[in-house]
């Protein structure tokens, strides 16, 4: 049986590999390409294609389990639990407009694309760091 | 969880100096470990000590379970046929699983009747890897396995390794002087510099702990963080820091890449990132 | 390990066996041909040391010159080749190719790897030496009783000597390979050591037993036999032994070049005055005693070299 989703890696993005996998699953869920009941590829299948560390795959799947999106069944595999509902899409729209306003303010203050990116990344990194500290 | 490799105060002499000095590390089982460092740092010496080709002159080194080794330049008996290499493995190792070997070679399309010396570099690397994997080891040690391989062969070797880790949960220890080769595949890193262990730890944890900061040079003194490496201009400071507390908003912070982390430590030989001492179980 | 020893050394085993067989065939064929020739041409009691056999001996030597040459070269040549091709590459090649890092990280310990290889190959090498000795013993009598004790070349090709020499040379090669970690230099060491020890042991053999002391008027008769000369002296008419007679006992001229006439005249004069030659020698009855003594020394040397090999290899495996 062919796996329903194929992962790909963007090495240049600077984002952790396991997070890229998590995002790709969520993206597929949002677009409806993955539905509850589908089996996610096994660690072995992912590793055979991408030559990454299987622990990375396990970590990604554990993160999805933690968020309630997937469930691992021993001896059988990891399966999609629920979809990402419309509510999330609404959140996205709201956040986007908020961010657009901020970007406009920054541009009016004379910052260019690089400056804006730098500040944005810095704030994001700090925010997540505070969580794990 | 036991450790696949444990070293305490390991020292190995080489002629009149020390190739390894006061090395301590503990690698948990099931990890894929990158052993990096400049040429001459002592990586091969450390690996030879781990697999028993060298006796420590000081300190202790223990490994748990069966150890398999793929040496630098992947030595094989050139005049043997591939089938004879497998026979060699079977005769010298009670734990040998011939089926793994023949299956893998069949998948790769390497005929058993060919003489080893007539195989390509990539094929020889695969045969050498099969020789190690068919022993069903708990710990697999590889000395610069990707050197002298074309990109396709390199990908094939890493793929074979990672698939084995996925299937059998073995611990892998790979040395390389090119960090980028190992970034996607390793989850533990050991940095060796001039015979000493500078860094030993989980890669994700290390990346979370460290930050690359850029900001006004005046702020550099009042920084609530351990500075590993720094470079300054008249106006700007760029710092690799660890365990940063609250930061002045004028600092721009970003995550460190593994390469930057390793380079930062190699340039500051006095700095170290080692795990806190663990209570030894009686 | 048995299979591995065979597989890694089968070239040497097969080549050596092949060469022994070829030599055997050569000796057999030429031996029968020589026997036929002798039956046809030889006076009674020939070939042998008698004066009457001189022509026949010369004719045989000329006819089988090539074989005699090979035979003359074998006592040092054969062990040197064994040491160079069986011994030197055993460890030399493993270190050179880096395969030591493969062979000594398997489940079989280095001690076992080395022990089995050395034991099996040592036995093979000794059997080869014995085969050579057997072939030479069978062939030589056809050419008359040339004696087997006095001449070093003959002695080292008979009895247990070849087996002992092949074993020793093998161990020298192995040890050289272990210490130098390269094959070609180890081969050179083998040739040098085998040559030096061959002549060294021959000199040392003077002490293997108490020499026989002969007092005689005619010394030459003693040295032309199948004997090993240990020393010469003189005894004066009163029975006192001395290195050389006192000056002035007889007129003594100095021979020029290869001439011997004046020396012979001097000695005849001494004998007339009552002096006698004293000759210390070992006779052919010592053959087996000397064979076993040589073999014991070479065997002890082999054990020491095996120990050296083991120590050097286990201490620094890569």
Image (cartoon, rainbow, N blue to C red):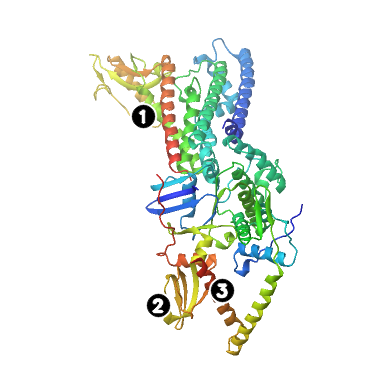
Across and down, in percent, residue A50 comes to 67, 58
Task: Name the residue that disc number 1 marks.
Answer: C255
Label 1 residue SS: loop
| Left or right: B3 as drawn, with respect to A74 | left
Task: Name the residue that disc number 2 marks.
Answer: B222
Q: Nearer the viewer, mark 3 or mark 2?
A: 3
Label 1–label 3 contact, CB within 8 A = no
Across and down, in percent, residue B270 comes to 40, 64
Q: Nearer the viewer, mark 2 or mark 1?
A: 2
Label 3 residue SS: helix
C253 versus A90 height, above or below? above
Per the model, the C-alpha gap separating discs 2 and 1 is: 106 Å
| Left or right: C291 as drawn, with respect to B154 | left
Per the model, the C-alpha gap separating discs 1 and 3 is: 112 Å
Per the model, the C-alpha gap separating discs 3 and 2 is: 23 Å
Which of the pair C21/C238 is nearer the observer?
Answer: C21
Label 2 residue SS: loop
Specify the label residue A124 is tagged with: 3
Across and down, in percent, residue B145 comes to 58, 53
Q: Residues within 10 Å of mark 2 (few under 14, many from 20)?
A: few
């Amino acid at each position: 049986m062919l796996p329903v989703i194929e992962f790909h890696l963007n090495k240049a993005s600077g984002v952790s590999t396991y997070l890229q996998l998590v995002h790709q699953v969520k993206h597929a869920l949002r677009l409806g390409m993955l539905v509850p009941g589908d089996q996610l590829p096994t660690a072995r299948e992912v590793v055979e294609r991408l030559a990454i560390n299987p622990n990375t795959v396990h970590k990604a799947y554990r993160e999805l389990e933690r968020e309630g999106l997937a469930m691992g069944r021993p001896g059988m595999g990891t399966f999609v639990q629920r979809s990402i509902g419309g509510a999330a899409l609404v959140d996205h729209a709201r956040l986007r407009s908020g961010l657009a306003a901020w970007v406009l303010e920054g541009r009016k203050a004379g910052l260019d694309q690089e400056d804006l990116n730098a500040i944005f990344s810095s704030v994001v990194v700090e925010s997540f760091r505070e969580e794990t500290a | 969880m036991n450790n696949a490799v444990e070293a305490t105060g390991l020292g190995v002499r080489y002629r009149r100096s020390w190739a390894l000095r006061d090395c301590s590390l503990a690698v948990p089982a099931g990890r894929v470990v990158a052993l990096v460092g400049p040429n001459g740092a002592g990586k091969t010496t450390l690996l030879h000590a781990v697999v028993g080709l060298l006796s420590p002159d000081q300190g202790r080194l223990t490994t748990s379970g069966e150890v398999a080794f793929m040496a630098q330049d992947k030595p094989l008996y050139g005049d043997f046929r591939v089938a004879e290499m497998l026979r060699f493995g079977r005769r010298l190792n009670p734990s040998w699983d011939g089926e793994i070997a023949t299956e893998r070679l069949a998948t790769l399309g390497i005929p058993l009747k060919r003489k080893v010396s007539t195989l390509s570099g990539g094929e020889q690397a695969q045969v050498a890897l099969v020789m190690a994997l068919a022993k069903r080891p708990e710990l697999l040690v590889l000395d610069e396995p990707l050197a002298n391989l074309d990109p396709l062969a390199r990908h094939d070797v890493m793929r074979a390794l990672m698939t084995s880790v996925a299937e059998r949960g073995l611990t892998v220890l790979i040395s390389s002087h090119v960090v980028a080769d190992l970034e996607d595949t390793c989850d533990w890193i050991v940095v060796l510099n001039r015979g000493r262990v500078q860094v030993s730890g989980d890669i994700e944890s290390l990346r979370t702990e460290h930050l690359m900061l850029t900001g006004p040079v005046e702020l550099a003194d009042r920084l609530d963080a351990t500075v590993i490496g720094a470079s300054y201009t008249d106006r700007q400071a760029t710092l690799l820091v660890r365990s940063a507390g609250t930061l002045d908003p004028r600092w721009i912070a970003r995550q460190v890449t593994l390469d930057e982390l390793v380079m930062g430590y190699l340039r500051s030989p006095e700095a170290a990132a080692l795990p806190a001492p663990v209570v030894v179980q009686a | 390990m048995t299979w591995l020893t065979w597989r890694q050394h089968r070239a040497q085993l097969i080549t050596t066996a092949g060469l022994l067989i070829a030599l055997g065939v050569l000796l057999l064929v030429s031996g029968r041909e020589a026997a036929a020739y002798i039956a046809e041409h030889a006076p009674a009691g020939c070939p042998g040391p008698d004066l009457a056999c001189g022509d026949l001996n010369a004719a045989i030597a000329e006819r089988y010159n090539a074989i005699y040459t090979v035979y003359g070269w074998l006592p040092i040549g054969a062990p040197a080749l064994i040491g160079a091709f069986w011994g030197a590459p055993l460890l030399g090649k493993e270190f050179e190719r880096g395969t030591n890092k493969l062979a000594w990280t398997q489940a079989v310990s280095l001690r076992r790897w080395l022990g089995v290889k050395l034991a099996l190959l040592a036995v093979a090498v000794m059997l080869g030496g014995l085969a050579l000795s057997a072939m030479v013993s069978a062939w030589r009598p056809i050419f008359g009783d040339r004696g087997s004790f006095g001449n070093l070349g003959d002695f080292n090709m008979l009895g247990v000597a070849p087996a002992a020499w092949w074993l020793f040379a093998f161990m020298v090669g192995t040890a050289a390979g272990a210490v130098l970690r390269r094959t070609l230099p180890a081969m050179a060491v083998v040739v040098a050591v085998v040559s030096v020890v061959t002549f060294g042991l021959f000199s040392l053999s003077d002490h293997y037993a108490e020499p026989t002391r002969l007092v005689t008027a005619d010394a030459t008769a003693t040295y032309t036999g199948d004997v090993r000369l240990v020393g010469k002296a003189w005894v004066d008419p009163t029975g006192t032994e001395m290195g050389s007679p006192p000056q002035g006992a007889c007129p003594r001229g100095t021979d020029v070049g290869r001439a011997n006439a004046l020396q012979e005249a001097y000695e005849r004069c001494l004998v007339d005055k009552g002096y006698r030659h004293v000759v210390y020698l070992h006779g052919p009855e010592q053959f087996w005693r000397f064979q076993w003594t040589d073999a014991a020394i070479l065997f002890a040397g082999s054990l020491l070299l095996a120990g050296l090999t083991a120590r050097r290899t286990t201490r620094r495996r890569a």
